[in-house]
Every structure is written in structure tokens, then in C-alpha cells.
Image (cartoon, helix red, strand yellow):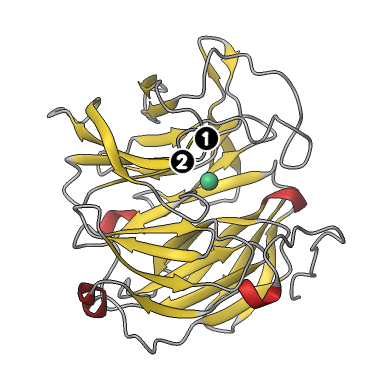
Amino acid sequence: MTAESKIFPNHRSAVPPEGLLEGVEVIDDRFLDLIDVNAEISKHYTGCEWAEGPVYFPEGDYVLWSDIPNNRILKFDAGTGDTMVFREPCNNTNGHFRDHQGRLVSCEHATNRISRTEPDGIVVSLVETLDGKRLNSPNDLIVKSDGTIWFTDPPYGILSDREGNQRDSELAGNYTYRLDPDTGVLSVVDKVGDRPNGLAFSPDEKLFYLADTGDPKDITVFDVSDDGKTLANRRQFAEVRPGASDGFRVDEQGNIWTSARDGVQCYSPEGTLLGKVLIPEQATANLTFGDKDGKRIYICGDTSLYSVRVKVAGAARYW
Ligand code: MG
């Protein structure tokens, strides 16, 4: 059964309808190597209060994503074109990722944890605390080639009941973490970020990118240590405007495809804005590469799920 629309009656509409644009905007001609200027932007589903955290499963050609305020995970089946409820309630999940065994790994606001959905459907907790103190509300995560899970922990799920449960933070800050799911060892990889959010590695995993939706609103880049466990040499990569980068993905050439208020923006590995995929929504939250060749971006834009074909595949491990 198609998932019912659950957009709130008081849904945010700060941008007037005439300000909502759709299409491909080329800023640097290199963008034409990455997307067709006339590429069709498809809207697959409308009915979320805040769509976030898309993840693609090539085995079934489907996308899962979170509708955070409505406490549900939706599933878009690319074969049938239908969208169904995958899990409700879901502990206000946010970001998702697919691990190397094809399992769903999720950030959960309401339970301040990272969970994994086993092949039999059982949901297990991977981590909930740091030194006995509850995490804030894990926001976004990625799985590295070594199987470790890297995630961010800003307070958005505890600031109010809208996206989780309001409460005081038990931690001294909003950190970015590395979790070894085999040993359970949790380590802090960055304490500097204000409200760390989206994250990704470069295709060779020598660089680590981190979005901050606090102050300043930017993407920073770090060097990854030779053992792949720690970060160094933090510096700014890009300031994404309008709005901010919430979530992003890296393609196989190392370009960064990030959300912004006006849609998806694509930055070269050097940090040059190449172009945009304008999405006619109040803000765009996140995206993931999909299709069996990896050459489609699925986009969570406020109330809806969109997609557009591109000419480059997502970096293989990071769909
Ligand atoms: Mg996010």
C-alpha cells in the first residue's frame, strides 16, 4: 500500500513558490561531463515532513529513507515506482548506510544509538553511549572499507520533541565518531565541529569530509592517518550557500555532491562549485547514488524523494 502523506498542516514554507526552481544549472563547463544539462528530474514521492538519509540497495533496486518527524522509514521500489512504509515507528531514524554485508545501518535519534538491521529483520544496537553517557542523537553515518562505522552526533534529536525526545545532553560536546562494530570500541575522531552532520571519505579514503550545520556552516576536510583510524590537518573545504550542506556523497572521480537549500550542488575535488541540480523544495537534506550502475542520484528534498541520472557513478563503497 502506498505510504500516506503526512506533511504537517504548519509545514515550513519560507521560500515562496516563485522562488522554487527546478533544473540543471551549469556554473563550470566541467559539470557537463557529470550530468546532461537537460537531464530529467523525477519526483517519486511526496508526503514527508522532513525527508532525510537515503540509502540505495542494488540487490532489490530500492531506496530507503527517513521521514524523521513522522517517525517512519519509507521504501521506494524503483521497479514498480511505488513507495511503501518500511518501518513505523522507527525511533526517529535519520541517516542510513548499507554495510559490506548488505545490512541496513541506521542513526536513531530517539534511542541515541546506531542500529543494524540483521537479515532476519531483527534490529540490534551497535552503540548508545560514550563512557557511560548517552549519545545526543546520531545524525549521519558511513561505512569505511575496513567495516568501521563513522558517524556524527549533533543535538537535533534532543533540542525538541519534533525529531526525537527533548532532553539535556549528557556529553560535553557534539562529536564525530569511529565505531568498530566487531569490538564495540568507540573513539572520537573530531571534537572541533559545532554541529557535525554529513560525512564522507574520498574514493581512496585518504581524505575525510565533514559537514557542519552549526557555526560556521561549511564542509571541512581532513587527512586520514595511514592506519585509517584518526584524522589530522583540519581545514575548510567549501562554504555551501544558500543554506548549508546537511548531507553529501562523493563520486568515483572525487567530486562532492551535497545538499543545500536550493537543491544539490556539485564541487570539484579542489572545492570549486561546478553546478547545481535545483530542486523545487524548501530545502534539500541529503542524497545517495543509485541504479545498478551507480549513475543516478536519489535526493531527499524536504517533503519528497527525487532522482536524476548522472554521467558518473558514486564512489563504489559509498552508495
Ligand atoms: Mg543530516
- Residue at image location 61% in from the left, 38% down from the top: 108
Q: Locate residue 181, reporting x and y percent.
A: 40, 31
Q: Is residue 294 above or below residue 114?
A: below
Mark 2 and mark 1: Cα distance apart in space: 6 Å
The residue closer to the viewer here, 134 or 261, is 261
- Residue at image location 39% in from the left, 77% down from the top: 25
Label 1, ligand 1: CB separation under 8 Å: no
The residue at the far top in this view is: 131
The residue closer to the viewer here, 185 or 160, is 160
Query: In the displayed structure, does residue 239 sit left or right of residue 201?
Result: right
- Residue at image location 60% in from the left, 26% down from the top: 136
Mark 2 vs 1: CB contact within 8 A: yes
Q: Which mark is residue 214?
A: 1
Query: In the displayed structure, does residue 215 sit left or right of residue 39?
Result: right
Q: Residues within 10 Å of mark 2 (few under 14, many from 20)?
A: many
Label 2, ligand 1: CB separation under 8 Å: no
Q: Locate residue 275, reporting x and y percent.
A: 34, 70
In terms of secondary structure, where does tag 2 sit? loop
Q: Residues within 10 Å of mark 1 (few under 14, many from 20)?
A: some
Say if residue 80 shows up in the picture.
yes
Q: Locate residue 29, reporting x and y percent.
A: 22, 77
Q: Quadrant of residue 138?
A: top right
Query: In the displayed structure, does residue 162 sit left or right of residue 246?
Result: right
Q: Is residue 75 above or below residue 307?
A: above
Q: Quadrant of residue 14?
A: bottom right
| Residue under numbered circle 2 | 217
